[in-house]
Amino acid sequence: MINTASTPPKPQSYKTNVEIDWCPGCGDFGILNSLVLALQELKIPNENVVLTGGIGCSSKIPHYVNVNTLHTLHGRSLVQAQAVKMANPRLEVISASGDGDGLGIGSAHFVAAGRRNVDMTYILFDNGVYGLTKGQASPTLPYGEMPKSIETENIKFPVNPLFLGLASGFTFVSRSYSYNIKHLKETLIRAMKHRGLSLVDVMQPCVTYNNINTKEFYDPRLYDIEKEGWNPVASNENEYKQKVPQAVLKSLEWGDKIPMGVFLDYQTETYDQKLQKLVPDYGKKNYVMDPIHSNGKPLNDVTDLMNSFC
Ligand code: SF4
């Protein structure tokens, strides 16, 4: 659910004055710019957005976007973001982190988030290395690859974020590219409009440590699956059960052609909708934003709500 402003904020209002210390040419810049453009196009007031990050180059993005932000612990970006959304469902919540942060130490949270389907967006900065700590192999580095930052070829099999997202229950699963601002901006807009948990896996070259998965590598390979006839929408549970295995197969393509676009778009009950059935007050009152007292007398009795969590 998107809360729009009557007067659209200017793009510059979404950027902070904090000096950006990403390496020149890093794919992170494209993600930052695409996110700012998407927020502006959706006319979401700055104060209605919360952006969380974990630890890593990518996870510095909360410092550069002028919204409510949390720079959290390693692998915990999704955790904090879900908590924020559950506490105040009126907010537009975005979680960002790198593939090392989100699929290494944060992998259990990635799976758990998929199972919940909280209505929010997760942006995965995917470059195959731990850039902040000098380019060690991260969970998405392909098997057998040896970027210049490591001394032997990668002997571990990679995690495929799209495959794992589909298997875990993410209801919007997509891939985009940090040097294709138009595609990335549009994908982020679709992800934010989707009611449920959205994954945007962004191919984001690390120009300092990964000399294999570069702009020259991706430009000729990436193709838009939707332009080639792929329909990501599953309108009901039966279609969902058919679409997921097809999307998994599509996600396994990696070579001369690499697919990007929206792989799955499935509208189903979100975690908060399910919670509303269990907790009568949930969603009706907003304990974060609503006044909590009048002349010193409490306006809300949260006893039932607290008891329901015991
Ligand atoms: Fe970007 Fe890599 Fe530099 Fe980190 S180390 S800022 S990911 S280019």
Image: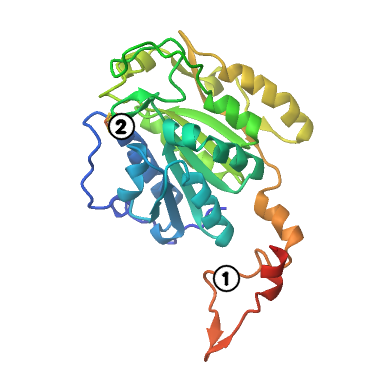
The numbered disc on residue 237 is none
**Disc with the residue nearer the chain's start (1 vs 2):** 2
**In what element is the residue under mark 2?**
helix
Q: In which quarter of the image is the C terminus?
A: bottom right
Do labels 1 and 2 touch, CB within 8 Å?
no
Q: In this view, does 38 lie above or below 301?
A: above
- Coordinates of residue 79 in the picture (x, y in percent): 52, 48
Comparing 95 with 307, the one in front is 307
Q: Could you tell me the amino acid type at mark 1?
A: Tyr
Q: Comparing marks 1 and 2, which lies closer to the viewer?
A: 2
On whether ligand 1 comes within 8 Å of the CB at mark 1, the answer is: no
Query: Image point 56% across, 27% down: which residue?
Result: 162
Query: Image point 71% across, 69% down: which residue?
Result: 307
On whether ligand 1 comes within 8 Å of the CB at mark 2, the answer is: no
Comparing 108 with 21, the one in front is 108
For residue 6, which quarter of the picture?
bottom left
Q: Is residue 288 above or below residue 212?
A: below
Q: Dot 2 corresponds to which residue?
A: 133
